[in-house]
Amino acid sequence: MLQTLRSKILFYFLLISMIGILFVSFFIQWGFEESFKNYLDTNREKKIDRVVLAIEKDFKSNGRFTSEPIIGLHEYALTDQLYFQLYDRFGQLQMDSSSIRGMMNGLGLTEPIKNKDEWRSKTYNLKVDDARIGKLVAIYPEGLIDDEHTFLQTIQLYIYAAVCLTIVLAILFSLIFSRKLTAGLKTLSFAAHELQRHNLTVRTPLKGLPDEVKQLAVSFNNLAESLSKEEMLRKQFTGDLAHELRTPLATLRSQIEAFQDGIWEPTPQRLKQSHEELMRLVRLINELEKLLAAENPQIKLEKIDIEAGTFLADVWEMFLPIFHQRGIELQMEPFEQEEWFKADKDKLVQILSNILNNALKYTPEGKTVSLSVVQEEDYIGFQIRDEGAGMDEDDIPHIFERFYRGDKSRDRKTGGVGVGLSIVKALMDAHKGKIQVKSKLKKGTTINLWFPKEED
């Protein structure tokens, strides 16, 4: 019982509704009954005041008690069960309308009162010109009379009917709302089950979902998209890796079998070719190991204070001979202002080395590669700008993905497997840095590497 979210929502919604309905109905009934009784008491007091004023006015006009106002007293006895006893100033009874009560009980017009305590009496002094002329005793029942009791019962019946109708509506709307509130979660649950069954194409529709569930659905769709992309990259990587391994292994196998069968003599030139194929396999394994190390979430950075201009000058001097040997000019733009930031020096050298090696591969002889220090707000960065082959704009968002190939033939020609920039991305993320890339085909590529000046 109450195992599902919908059943819990339904139960608590109904519980709160029932408690609210009971409290409201109780206070409405209690408040109406009290207000109705107060109204009756006030109305009775007004009637008694009118009787008192009528008797005093008649006594002032005639100098004695007459029968004219007394007739009105009998009318109250017949209609409102309001009885009066009139006494003069000597205590002599002048009129008693309560005698009508016995006659009415005998005729069955009123219910006989068995207990005397159920009747109340109240005495009013009668005065004319500040002189006491007698007293008037008003006698009336403690509770409600017939018509008043009937009216109150009718109102209570309406209240009970409204409570029952409200309870039915509360149950109905609770069922509807609980189903509507959990509909989005059911959709997400179904999608998660499909994802668990390796259906990576499943997506959750966002239309009609509440904001909280919509955010969860967006996160789920992003996760499914990421898993789908990772699965695609995994398959692509498997094919690329198999191809990269197959070529040198096939070459080595054919050469070794030729040596074994005596078809080839193991000359130094042929042994050198076999060694080159073997070293190609070694480089591939080394790149994969570097990528795994860079993407390790437990990677620890040995951060130190680094001055941007001095560090870039050291990197420029380190790569200058290699670029000169390839006939490519490596320029460094001077940056006189000192800018310090914290970074792991070895990892920083690895980042710039991978970027510069890419620029070296894809920049033709006679062209230029420029290095410079740049800064913006809370970041200090390095800019590497080349005049190489560039890349298509559609490839830019994917170049840091593992084993991504924009031009597969070009990658095979240069011998790369597409992990260098993935290593750069992983190490930049570890430094909480960011990368900006701008490139145009046959125009060149500009890469900005941004590092925070201060630690969070």
Image: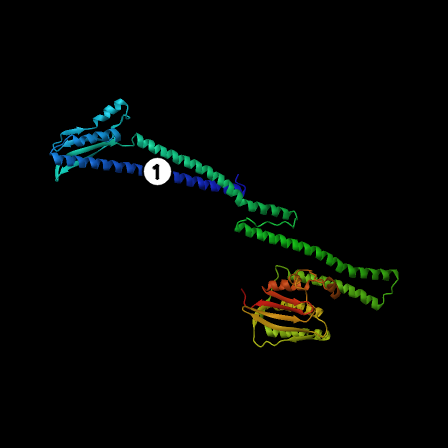
Q: In this view, does 432 lie to the left or right of 279?
A: left
Q: Where is residue 287 in the image (x, y as percent from the top left)?
A: 70, 63
Q: Residue furthest right?
A: 262
Quadrant assignment, res 307:
bottom right
Could one spot residue 36 in this view of the protein? yes
Q: In this view, does 418 lie to the left or right of 101?
A: right
So how many labels did they put on this image? 1
Q: Where is residue 379 in the image (x, y as percent from the top left)?
A: 56, 68
Could one spot residue 306 in this view of the protein? no
**SS at circle 1:** helix
- Number of other residues with Cα within 10 Å of mark 1, as a class: few under 14, some 14 to 19, many 20 or more: few
Q: Which residue is drawn at 29% across and 38% down?
A: 39
Q: Which residue is drawn at 61% across and 66% down?
A: 436
Q: Position of residue 132 (x, y in %)?
A: 13, 37
Disc 1: which residue: 30
Is residue 207 placed above or below 72 in the rendered structure? below
Q: Position of residue 278 (x, y in %)?
A: 77, 63
Quadrant assignment, res 314:
bottom right
Q: Is residue 45 left or right of residue 267?
A: left
> For the residue marked with disc 1, what is the amino acid?
Trp
Q: Which residue is drawn at 26% across and 22% down?
A: 107
- In this view, the residue in front, 410 or 45, is 45
